[in-house]
Amino acid sequence: MLHRCGGVLSALLVVTSAAGQAVHVDLTALSSVVTVRVEPAVASAPYFDATVELGVWPAMIAVYVEPDVRQQVDVGAAVSAVGLGGAQLQASTVPGWTYVKLPGEARLGSAEQAVWSLADRGDVSFASLVYVGQGGLPVIPSRDLLVFFLPETGVEAQATILSDHGATLIERDAAGMAGLVRARLNVRSGDEVLSIAQAINDRPEVAWAQSDHVYWARHMGALPPNDPLFPQQWALEQANDEDMDALDAWGITIGDDSVRVVVLDTGTQQDHPDIHQVTGQSFTGSGTNGGPGNRCDNHGTAVAGCVAATINNGIGIAGIAPGARVQAAKIFNEIDFLGLLCLPFLESTDAWTVAGINWSASSGARVTNSSWGGGNPSAAITTAFDTTKAAGVVHFAAAGNDGTGTVGYPANLASVNAVAAMASDGTRASFSTYGPGLFISAPGAAVLSTDRTGSAGYGSDNWTTIDGTSFASPYAAGVAALVISAHPSLTPDEVSDIMAQTAVDKGTPGYDTGFGWGFVNAGAAVAAAAGNPCPPDLTGDGVLDFFDVSLFLSNFSAQAPSADLTGDGLYDFFDVSLYLGMFSAGCP
């Protein structure tokens, strides 16, 4: 994971070699790969009515060649022809794009000159600086714009606006989003795209506009820890009861086969023997039916197992919702650096991500999981999460692995439930991000999940022990699938409310930014969804006592939805009186 230190990015990466060995790589020593000094705030990109400042990596640029003529264009020769002999090339996982590590000392002026020299060539379609967005990760403008017009803006007016800014319509209802227009600019460099996108975004007829960026994100997981003494699948049940009470939940439902959780990730092995799934879909141009596309696409398979590894099949493990089904939406490619190292980063475009989110809703999925983040915010992606939640999909995302108090994008969106990671001793994992906007916490340290089979994946087995909020998030998403299985008519907000109300409180009583609503409890959540025969028994232990009253008062003080018993939107004497009346009446 990259960390910003002054104006320099430095990191120690743990990556996988071609032989499957763990390799520790000091990026600061990889001068042949990247020079990671960042020039801050050299440009900005629109984000709804705001702008996001962009830095730049002056040691690297990005070049685009149309895929249909790629075979006839030698990018290396083009780079050498403009005086950049000694530059190193790395193919992007996004078709048509190549990263160019510039020779010599990293200077912004030199990078800008390289961009224009290449953009002026007839054999190169487009070139751009490699900008650095929020989270310190690359974001590269493409020639394509994503424009969301206000509903009252007619088709002719839209065409005029696009024409005024030199854009040509390519597609309406792009990426599966009604009203989204994709248009292409006849420009040669990324800075021109940013300027035009801002100008269109500022038009009164436009809700928002942006480039269809190529962007990097972090997967919120890591390679397996080397400590073999962690209890296997402690997340489901363990002696100290710091777990999700899976057996209590499974006494009511193991999940309904009709409930699907879409894993928005790098693909899931479609023929894995221990994952209960249905055929997925690929949006990145690599992989088939939502399966991995290269040797590094391992993350999605481990995420999927947390949700719905198959139960009672005589092998492996069980997911928290083993009767529900996962479905892969491959919206990312993991990065295979020079065929030598699997870097811990994911690569996508805004359009791929939006298409995957919208497909999740249109295909009938009830839950999505996003075990990724840390990159630049995107109006297109934000809108996709917002509109699909409104359509009935509940979204979960990993809070992050930097151990800070700032939840990253997209987990920080109001339409997405951010999930922190817990350790087996009931504390928050040391690596887990927390902070304002955190929804809930779930197991994420040394959890056992599925791995790609054979020689693929993180190890040589079909299962792996692994760390990260990447795996806490799908556990929470799986609990949501159980809740929906027990009560299918629940809305996304109602599902979230039940999970919040039944979580095991941690930290400050009631909601806090360290744990959100607490440690997710599948047993209590499913019981609540199925219909609690004793409403005042808030702890779900079958006993009415001080702890139930204390939990109600904590929720009341935090103005949790569960404490508004009168349903009038107020938190007052009448709610307290109603609860005490139920408590006094006892359980049936």
Image (cartoon, rainbow, N blue to C red):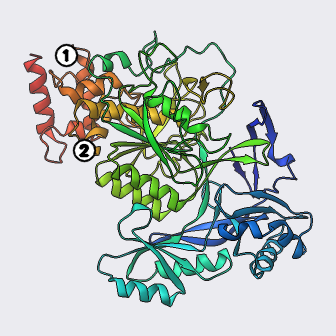
Q: Nearer the viewer, residue 213 or 374?
A: 213
Task: Determine crowd level at label 1: few under 14, some 14-19, many 20+ residues with C-alpha closer than 10 A.
Answer: some
The local secondary structure at tag 2 comes to loop
Residue identifier under label 2: 491
Residue 550, image x and y in percent? 27, 25
Q: How many marks?
A: 2
**Is 290 above or below relative to 484?**
below
The image quarter in which residue 24 lies? top right
Q: Give the farthest residue toward the top.
A: 239
| Quadrant housing the N terminus | top right
Earlier sequence position, callout 2 versus callout 1: 2
| Quadrant housing the C terminus | top left
Which residue shows up at 74% across the image and 57% down it?
91
Q: Nearer the viewer, residue 540 or 313?
A: 313
* Amino acid type, mark 1: Leu
Q: Nearer the viewer, residue 304 or 242?
A: 304
Which residue shows up at 52% across the image and 57% down it?
352
Which residue shows up at 74% across the image and 55% down it?
6
Task: Determine crowd level at label 2: few under 14, some 14-19, many 20+ residues with C-alpha closer than 10 A.
Answer: some
Which residue shows up at 44% across the image and 40% down it?
279
Residue 460, image x and y in percent? 68, 23
Q: Nearer the viewer, residue 514 or 251?
A: 251
Residue 314, image x and y in percent? 47, 12
* Amino acid type, mark 2: Thr
Q: Which is in the foreground here, disc 2 or disc 1?
A: 2
The local secondary structure at tag 1 comes to loop
Q: Is residue 102 at least partly visible in the picture?
A: yes
Q: Is residue 369 left or right of residue 343?
A: left
**Is 103 above or below relative to 260?**
below
Residue identifier under label 1: 544
